[in-house]
Image: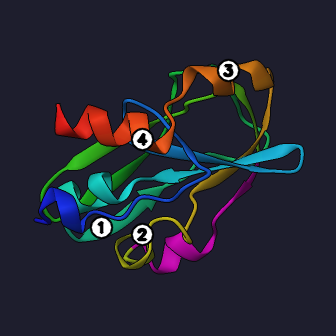
Amino acid sequence: MKEFNELAFKDGLRYSNDHEWVSEKGTTLKVGVSDYAQDQMGDIVYVELPEVGATFEKGDEFGTLESVKAVSELYLPISGEVVAVNEDLGDAPELINRDCYANWIIEIKPADMSELEDLLSVDAYRELLKG
């Protein structure tokens, strides 16, 4: 596992307490997992993705990541409708381990953009991990 100073953080993203990240892309949001999350899991071997068109409330489980160590639930940081899933992860789930910020998991059309304000800035997320 990485030391804290080895973890990658990406400016401009918002983070959840559950270690998902959110990036704005016009009127949609991409959601993935942080470097901390993928590092804690180890080698990811399977990603369970939701169906396009599925709707979720903030905090709902929308999928899972399976690693050689465990299965971890993914929780949606913002309410919305799934408009795309990263199909590449079906054949190559290890892409998340290679670059968790380039390899998003789902893209959503948010129900309420103001929910972004409840998420952590990169600095606040660092502080959460330090604590």
Q: Quadrant of residue 102?
A: bottom right
Nearest to N terminus: mark 2 or mark 4: 2
As shown in the figure, which amino acid type bears the numbered disc 1?
Ile
Residue ID for mark 2: 96
Q: Residue 99's image quarter?
A: bottom left
Farthest residue to the right: give it.
27
As displayed, is residue 24 above or below residue 86? above
Spatial distance from mark 4 to mark 1, Cα to Cα? 27 Å
Query: Which residue bears the numbered disc 1?
Result: 44
Q: Position of residue 29 (x, y in %)?
A: 73, 45
Cα–Cα gap, marks 4 and 3: 18 Å
**Mark nearer the N terminus (3 vs 1):** 1
Residue displayed at 66% across by 28% down: 116
Residue 66 image-quadrant placement: bottom left
Q: Which residues are magenta?
A: 83-93
The residue that label 4 is drawn on is 123
Tell me, yes or no, whether the highlighted magenta stretch contains residue 88.
Answer: yes
Q: Is residue 105 magenta?
A: no
| Location of mark 3 (residue) | 115
Q: Residues within 10 Å of mark 3 (few under 14, many from 20)?
A: few
Classify mark 3: helix, strand or loop: helix
**Residue type highlighted by circle 2:** Ile
The amino acid sitting under disc 4 is: Asp
| 28 w.r.t. 97: above or below | above
Q: Earlier in the sequence, mark 1 or mark 2?
A: 1
The image shows residue 23 at horizontal and vertical percentages of: 66, 50
Comparing 27 with 81, the one in front is 27
User: What's the residue at 58%, 61% (across, down)?
Assistant: 104
**Mark closer to the chain start, 4 or 1:** 1
